[in-house]
Amino acid sequence: MEYDAFENLVNTMGSEVYSFCLQLARSRDEADELYQDTMLAAMEKYKKIDALGNPKSFLLGIVLRQWKNKRRRIARRRRICPLTVLDEQIEEIYPADEQSLEEKIVRKETIQMVRKLTAQLPDKFQIPVYLYYSRELPIEEIAAVMHIPAGTVKSRLHKARAILKSGLEED
């Protein structure tokens, strides 16, 4: 891929890549850092991107690798020197609609519960759920991003849905 085509790719897919970074990182500061690391890595490899293939999955694969590497580094540092970390929540923006106050509160609580339960899933279940439901990627693209067979993606999505369902039913 030529540099001009890469620049165009970043301009068109940048917001989707950033949104995925935000979902993985769960805070704007960390998402900004992850996005920046991703774009630097993509810039270093822009000649390897196949413009006719699926450049979106290539970029999302880089995001995923950067995020996993960062989590490994943090885990290694915490084993050496444990730190106390404060959890930050993502800002939630709801469109104005004709729902009653009770419906809005119930919807907000349900969304928070699903996010909480999803965040508690192991990474091997959490990442396919985010890619499938938030990024609306087909199973084949998720398999390409995660470098696993499509059947494995399907089984992980099925297992994640079962875990989420049982968690919602308990609540």
Image (cartoon, rainbow, N blue to C red):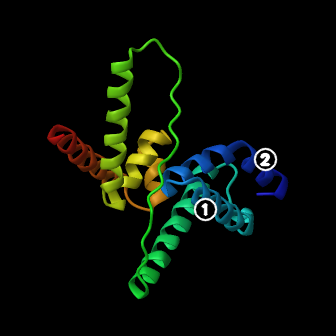
Quarter the C terminus occupies = top left
Residue 39 is left or right of residue 151, and the answer is: right
Q: Quadrant of residue 36?
A: bottom right
Q: Which residue is mark 2?
A: 8
Question: Residue 68 location in percent, x, y?
Answer: 48, 68
| Residue at 73% over, 50% down | 10
Front residue (pair 4, 132):
132
Q: Residue reaching furthest left? A: 170
Q: Residue reaching furthest top? A: 98
Q: Considering the numbered disc 1 on the image, is that residue within a helix, a strand or a loop?
A: helix
Measured Cα–Cα span from mark 1 to mark 2 = 20 Å
Residue 100 is left or right of residue 21, and the answer is: left
Q: Which residue is mark 1?
A: 34
Residue 50 is left or right of residue 60, and the answer is: right
Mark 1 vs 2, N-terminal side: 2
Question: Residue 11 location in percent, x, y?
Answer: 75, 45
Is label 1 or label 2 in front?
A: 1
What amino acid type should be assigned to the residue bearing mark 1? Leu
Quarter the N terminus occupies = bottom right
